[in-house]
Image: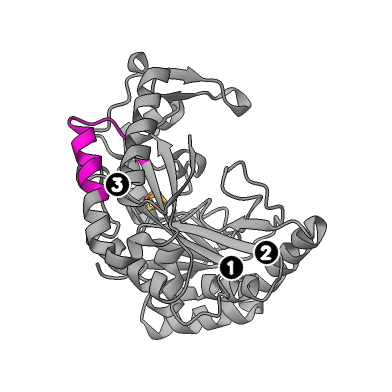
């Protein structure tokens, strides 16, 4: 796939006070991309587009360069102690993506240039927990890999964490633009994960992202560059013949990875879920989606802030967990299943 190129770029004036901000300004100017000024990266008022539908699509190809003011990195993800905010938003069009609800009316992509301040905060968090390991997740609010070939901020973060003793970095991607990350001095402190799914899910619900083959080619490259490798199977979705669909996924994965399949690869398993507000937004942004979100067929799970999620009923969830774990044990005997949720 062609790497992402924004159609429109906005800059917060303050971003130009940072080396990365200046560098990006010059880069986009020399690329001939339309540049505007915005007083705050949280408020872009004059985005073009007639309808909400059009505005949403334009926003997803708009990049905003700003300064991250909130330096609190809490996360509720099971995979890390803290988030590390390098970017917010994504150019992908996955129908089920939770960013549609969390970002609401601001689906444009924001990147933050005050890396020095962000790293200072990271260092504090690591110090607080020493000698425990502290894990940072860089993909909580975006798919950072797809944007990084423009900013290199992920590469800098990989190298920053690489020289710490107790810090670890993780992120997940559906994009294959990894070449510039292959020579980063990661010291094996970064786990590079790829999101994978059955053909049905990738075809119907993940437009605007890398194909399965592209993701696996990229996975091979990063594994050969010495990064610990992982896969997130998410969302696990019970489409027609899903057992066959996921069986084929693991067979293909094993074949494509060859010898690498016998290494210690991590797997994270996440079943499909949705909230009521998410359903509404998904149907607005992707009115023709085949994504099935029937509350009657799901189990309600109480959530924070009073917004519960609809997950698969207990028995179905158990079947999913057993089936997918079974495939992993069969095709990746040295693999490590970290959790199912
Ligand atoms: S690639 Fe990830 S972050 Fe981007 S739209 Fe898809 S699910 Fe959302």
> Residue 168: percent from the left, percent from the top?
62, 62
Q: Residue at x 57, y 25 (%)?
A: 303
Residue 248 lies, with reference to residue 218, above or below; the image says above
Q: Residue furthest right?
A: 128
Pointers 3 and 1 in contact (CB under 8 A)? no
Dot 3 falls on a residue whose secondary structure is loop
The first of marks 2 and 3 along the sequence is 2
The tag on residue 167 is 2
- In space, the residues marked 2 and 3 are separated at their CA atoms by 29 Å
Front position among marks 3 and 1 = 1
> Residue 253: percent from the left, percent from the top?
27, 55
- In space, the residues marked 3 and 1 are separated at their CA atoms by 26 Å
The tag on residue 197 is 3
Q: Quadrant of residue 189?
A: bottom right
Q: Residue furthest top?
A: 296
Q: To which residue does mark 1 refer?
A: 189
The first of marks 2 and 1 along the sequence is 2
- In space, the residues marked 2 and 1 are separated at their CA atoms by 7 Å
Residue 225 lies, with reference to residue 219, above or below; the image says below
Q: Check residue 246 for magenta coloring.
A: yes
Is residue 145 left or right of 80 when viewed as pictured?
left
Pointers 2 and 3 in contact (CB under 8 A)? no
Task: Judge whether residue 288 can be spotted in this image.
Answer: no
Residue 215 lies, with reference to residue 51, above or below; the image says below
Task: Judge whether residue 262 can be spotted in this image.
Answer: yes
Dot 1 falls on a residue whose secondary structure is loop
The first of marks 3 and 1 along the sequence is 1
Pointers 2 and 1 in contact (CB under 8 A)? yes
Is residue 27 left or right of 120 when viewed as pictured?
left
């Amino acid at each position: 796939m062609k790497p992402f190129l924004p159609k429109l770029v906005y800059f917060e004036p303050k971003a130009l006070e940072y080396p990365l901000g200046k560098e990006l300004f010059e880069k986009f100017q020399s690329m001939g991309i339309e540049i505007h000024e915005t007083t705050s990266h949280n408020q872009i008022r004059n985005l073009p587009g007639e309808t909400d539908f059009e505005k949403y699509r334009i926003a997803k190809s708009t990049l905003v360069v700003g300064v991250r003011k909130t330096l609190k990195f809490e996360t509720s993800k099971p995979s890390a102690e803290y988030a590390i905010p390098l970017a917010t938003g994504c150019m992908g069009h996955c129908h089920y993506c939770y960013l549609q609800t969390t970002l609401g009316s601001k689906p444009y992509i924001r990147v933050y240039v005050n890396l020095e301040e962000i790293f200072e905060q990271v260092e504090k968090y690591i110090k607080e927990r020493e000698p425990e390991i502290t894990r940072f997740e860089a993909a909580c609010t975006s798919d950072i890999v797809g944007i990084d070939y423009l900013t290199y901020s992920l590469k800098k973060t990989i190298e920053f964490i690489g020289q710490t003793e107790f810090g670890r970095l993780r992120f997940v991607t559906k994009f294959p633009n990894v070449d510039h990350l292959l020579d980063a001095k990661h010291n094996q402190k970064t786990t590079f994960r790829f999101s994978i799914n059955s053909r049905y899910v990738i075809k119907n619900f993940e437009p605007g992202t890398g194909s399965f083959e592209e993701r696996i080619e990229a996975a091979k490259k990063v594994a050969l560059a010495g990064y610990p490798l992982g896969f997130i199977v998410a969302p696990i979705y019970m489409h027609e013949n899903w057992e066959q669909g996921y069986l084929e996924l693991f067979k293909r994965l094993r074949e494509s990875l060859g010898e690498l399949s016998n290494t210690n690869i991590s797997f994270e398993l996440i079943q499909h879920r949705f909230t009521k507000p998410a359903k509404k937004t998904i149907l607005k942004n992707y009115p023709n989606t085949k994504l099935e979100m029937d509350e009657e067929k799901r189990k309600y799970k109480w959530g924070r802030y009073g917004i519960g999620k609809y997950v698969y009923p207990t028995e179905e969830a158990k079947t999913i967990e057993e089936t997918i774990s079974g495939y992993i044990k069969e095709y990746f005997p040295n693999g490590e299943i970290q959790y199912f949720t």
